[in-house]
Image (cartoon, rainbow, N blue to C red):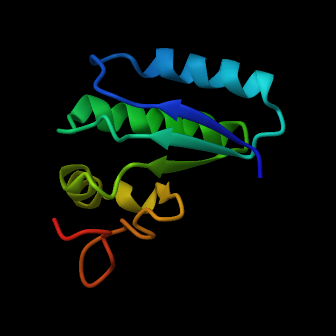
Amino acid sequence: METVEITFGPLRPGAGPFLCDQLAALLANRPDAAVVVCDVSAVERPTPADLDHLAQVRLAARRVGRDLVLRGVGPRPQLVLVLVLTGLGGVFGGEAGEPSSIRGVGGESHGQPP
């Protein structure tokens, strides 16, 4: 399966459209890519802007028929916790070796305990 990889790190608020434009350019050059892999290993302390950017990139990928999976979530317990608490955990999938489920509370797997 062909993939496109993007790296996601601390960004200033309002950078979502820029990220979506970058993703669109990457996908235009790789029409065979079915999956966008978003490396979030640089996100140490997720901010509301980070969550907004992730949601925007995920929506941009879905609009063109691509799946988006996160890489680097596992060693970031704060990011896992924020995704779970905001309900976004079920929106994002993880790569092999990553938490298979970061969906929610109540006995579901979160990858690592928060």
Quarter assignment of residue 103: bottom left
Q: Based on the displayed image, in which of its 4 quarters is residue 50 positioned?
A: top left
The x, y position of residue 19, in whole percent, is 49, 21
Q: Residue 27: which quarter of the image? A: top right
Q: Is 9 drawn above or below residue 100 in the view shown?
A: above
Where residue 24 sits: x, y (%)?
Answer: 66, 23
Residue drawn at 18 percent across, 51 percent down: 78
Q: Residue at x 48, y 58 (%)?
A: 94
Count of marks, rendered view:
0
Q: Position of residue 39 (x, y in %)?
A: 45, 40
- Whether residue 14 sits left or right of residue 45 in the image: it is right
Residue 112 higher or lower than 7, as above or below: below
- Can you give x and y, in whole percent of width and height, for residue 25 in the image? 68, 18
Q: Is residue 54 left or right of residue 77?
A: right
Q: Quadrant of the C terminus?
A: bottom left
What residue lies at 74% left-to-right and 46% top-to-bottom?
Answer: 34
Q: Is residue 87 above or below residue 104?
A: above
Q: Residue furthest right?
A: 32
Left or right placement of residue 27 versus residue 12 in this view = right
Q: Nearer the viewer, residue 74 or 16?
A: 74
